[in-house]
Each structure stands twice: as structure tokens, then as C-alpha cells.
Amino acid sequence: MVASDTLSVPGTVALGETIQVEYTVNNNADVEALGNWYDYFYLSDDDTLDNYDTYIGGRYTGSDTPLAAQSSYTATTD
């Protein structure tokens, strides 16, 4: 399973302001996570991803994959 463990964002932002997001993704599985994928970011007012959430960006992970078993990567994106 590949899951995000940590996320760092500013506490407040102004409308139209660019923010920097730093996060860590862990592969908790006993096997390598093959292929490439995108890490997507959404704004939500709860803990559930649904149609009410707003997509705010993404990052292609090609330089961080494949992700070895029990390993992680940390990335920063604007």
C-alpha cells in the first residue's frame, strides 16, 4: 500500500496566493510499487474525498518511482 504520511501546508492563505505543499509518501507493502502515478491535491472541509472537494493541483511521480518496498519519498510542489 502506498500512502501519504505527512503533509505540510500554510495555516492560512490569501485568495489567489500560491502555496507550497510538502508531503511524504510511504510504501508500506512488502513489494515494490511499480509504474508511475500522480499525487493529487484537493481542498476539503472534511476527511472524505467527494464531489464537493476542489482539485488544486498534482505532481507526476516519475522521478520517484518505482518505489521500493518499505521506502518513501518526500516532495515539495507549488
Image (tube, grey):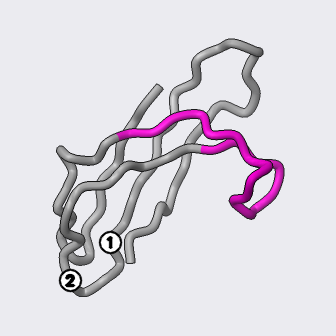
Picture disc at residue 60:
none
Which residue in the structure is indicated by mark 2?
31
* Residue at 41% from the left image edge and 54% from the top image edge: 24
- Spatial CA span between label 2 and label 1: 8 Å
Examine the rendered structure and indicate whether residue 22 appears above or below residue 77: below
Q: Amino acid at mark 1?
A: Asn
Residue furthest to the bottom in view is: 30
Mark 2 vs 1: CB contact within 8 A: no
Element marked by disc 1? strand
* Residue at 37% from the left image edge and 49% from the top image edge: 38
Element marked by disc 2? loop
The spot of residue 50 in percent (x, y) is: 73, 58
Picture disc at residue 27:
1
* Labels in figure, total: 2
Examine the rendered structure and indicate whether residue 50 appears above or below residue 38: below
The spot of residue 19 in percent (x, y) is: 58, 24
Q: Amino acid at mark 2?
A: Val
Residue 56: in magenta span: yes
The spot of residue 34 in percent (x, y) is: 19, 68
In this picture, which residue range is highlighted in magenta? Answer: 42-59
Q: Is residue 52 left or right of 42 when viewed as pictured?
A: right
The spot of residue 67 in percent (x, y) is: 21, 64
* Residue at 52% from the left image edge and 34% from the top image edge: 57
Examine the rendered structure and indicate whether residue 15 appears above or below residue 35: above
Residue 19: in magenta span: no
Quadrant, the N terminus: bottom left
